[in-house]
């Protein structure tokens, strides 16, 4: 018969912790106190947590030295050349290329670089700084340097959600704690919207009800674009290089509707005025604190309508300044 599993008394728990301090194994402690291993492990959870924090770094660093990962800084700075934000996957790939390096999985490398003092951080969003993209961006800015802003209709899609995108503060009393900022990787409610702005023009907000494909874009969005361009003098369409925008079916539909689209440079959201309007829209939606899908849609419409035409025109006219800045920086992002 095995050792019975009954509730452990305080005296037995004290004895288990005392044996653990003597560096005895879980099985040895189980035999001493005549309790099953699982019960002993439950008692040792608190002890293991405290002792592991003190020794984990030293143990993992020693294992790292045995495997040849001495100093994760060499791995990050030496093996992954040219990567400003190396990931565990890229470090693992570089480590595998080392001659004579023992095998190590993702989890092993992750433990090693944490034990050696490195911390995981979210990579900041930056505009692509590739020389080829910079050259394309510079060529676009120079070729459209004299293009009048009043002739362009800026369009784009955007996801809005119930995430809190503001840094606002609130006044509370001692009896009421400050509300928590809620920002989840996958928001509880989100919806895609489409909008268009021009000098003296702001379209109605269009809710995208399915995945944006070229077929959806041609059937639902292109008619709205055609109608909106009538409000812009000698209107030229601006939309980015998303697949539904650059698909052959979309190009054919735009040509049939006699709509001219700008050859927008890839990876250049900072040039698009409506992208900056979306940022302001996110903050205004967050201030309305929607909690459901219906509330989110109402908040999006309310926030969109709150933009005055003067504010919209300021975003549109900023396009000329962005082109000038691009020429000054020779296509490099800022």
Image (cartoon, rainbow, N blue to C red):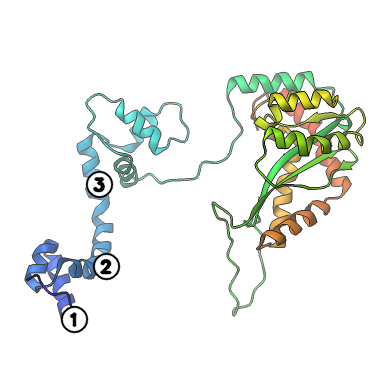
Between marks 3 and 1, how big is the CA–CA gap?
35 Å
Residue at x 40% of width, y 46% of height? 119
Q: Residues within 10 Å of mark 1 (few under 14, many from 20)?
A: few
Q: Residues within 10 Å of mark 3 (few under 14, many from 20)?
A: some
Q: Quadrant location of residue 90?
A: top left
Between marks 3 and 2, how big is the CA–CA gap?
20 Å
Residue 330 visible to an observer of this rendering:
no
Q: Looking at the image, do the residues carrying marks 1 and 2 touch, with CB atoms under 8 Å apart? A: no
Q: Position of residue 282 (x, y in %)?
A: 70, 51
Is 19 placed above or below 56 here? below
Viewed as shown, does residue 203 lie left or right of 71?
right
Residue at x 36% of width, y 28% of height? 79
Viewed as shown, does residue 262 lie left or right of 232?
left
Q: Earlier in the sequence, mark 3 or mark 1?
A: 1
Residue 1 vs residue 323, the one in the foreground: 1
Is 319 placed above or below 252 here? below
Q: Position of residue 1 (x, y in %)?
A: 6, 71
Residue at x 37% of width, y 33% of height? 91
Q: Earlier in the sequence, mark 1 or mark 2?
A: 1
Q: Position of residue 152 (x, y in %)?
A: 84, 31
Q: Label 2: which residue? A: 46
For mark 2, give the secondary structure: helix
Q: Earlier in the sequence, mark 3 or mark 2?
A: 2
Q: Quadrant of the C terminus?
A: top right
Residue 144 vs residue 105, the one in the foreground: 105
Q: Label 3: which residue? A: 60
Q: Quadrant location of residue 107?
A: top left
For mark 1, give the secondary structure: loop
Q: Between tags 1 and 2, which lies in front?
A: 1
Q: Position of residue 287 (x, y in %)?
A: 71, 60
Is 252 placed above or below 189 here? above
């Amino acid at each position: 018969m095995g050792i019975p599993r009954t509730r452990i008394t305080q005296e037995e728990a004290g004895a288990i912790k005392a044996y653990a301090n003597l560096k005895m194994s879980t099985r040895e402690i189980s035999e001493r106190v005549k309790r099953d291993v699982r019960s002993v492990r439950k008692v040792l959870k608190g002890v293991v947590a405290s002792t592991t924090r003190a020794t984990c770094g030293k143990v993992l660093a020693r294992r790292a030295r045995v495997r040849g990962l001495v100093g994760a800084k060499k791995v990050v700075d030496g093996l992954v050349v040219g990567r400003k934000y190396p990931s565990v996957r890229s470090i693992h790939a570089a480590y595998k290329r080392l001659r004579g390096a023992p095998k190590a999985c993702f989890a092993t490398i992750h433990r090693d670089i944490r034990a050696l003092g490195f911390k995981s951080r979210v990579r900041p969003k930056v505009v692509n700084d590739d020389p080829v993209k910079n050259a394309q961006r510079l060529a676009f800015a120079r070729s459209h340097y004299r293009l009048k802003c009043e002739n362009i209709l800026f369009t784009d899609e955007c996801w809005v959600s119930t995430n809190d995108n503001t840094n606002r503060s609130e006044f509370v009393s001692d009896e009421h704690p400050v509300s928590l900022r809620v920002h989840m990787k996958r928001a509880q409610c989100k919806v895609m919207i489409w909008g268009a702005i021009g000098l003296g023009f702001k379209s109605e907000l269009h809710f995208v009800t399915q995945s944006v494909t070229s077929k959806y874009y041609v059937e639902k969005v292109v008619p709205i674009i055609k109608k909106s361009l009538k409000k812009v003098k000698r209107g030229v369409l601006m939309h980015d290089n998303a697949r539904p925008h650059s698909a052959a079916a979309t190009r054919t539909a735009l040509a049939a509707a006699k709509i001219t689209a700008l050859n927008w440079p890839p990876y250049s959201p900072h040039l698009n005025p409506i992208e900056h309007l979306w940022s302001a829209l996110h903050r205004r939606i967050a201030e309305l604190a929607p909690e459901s899908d219906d509330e989110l849609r109402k908040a999006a419409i309310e926030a969109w309508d709150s933009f005055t035409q003067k504010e919209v025109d300021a975003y549109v006219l900023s396009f000329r300044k962005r082109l000038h800045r691009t020429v000054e920086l020779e296509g490099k992002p800022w």
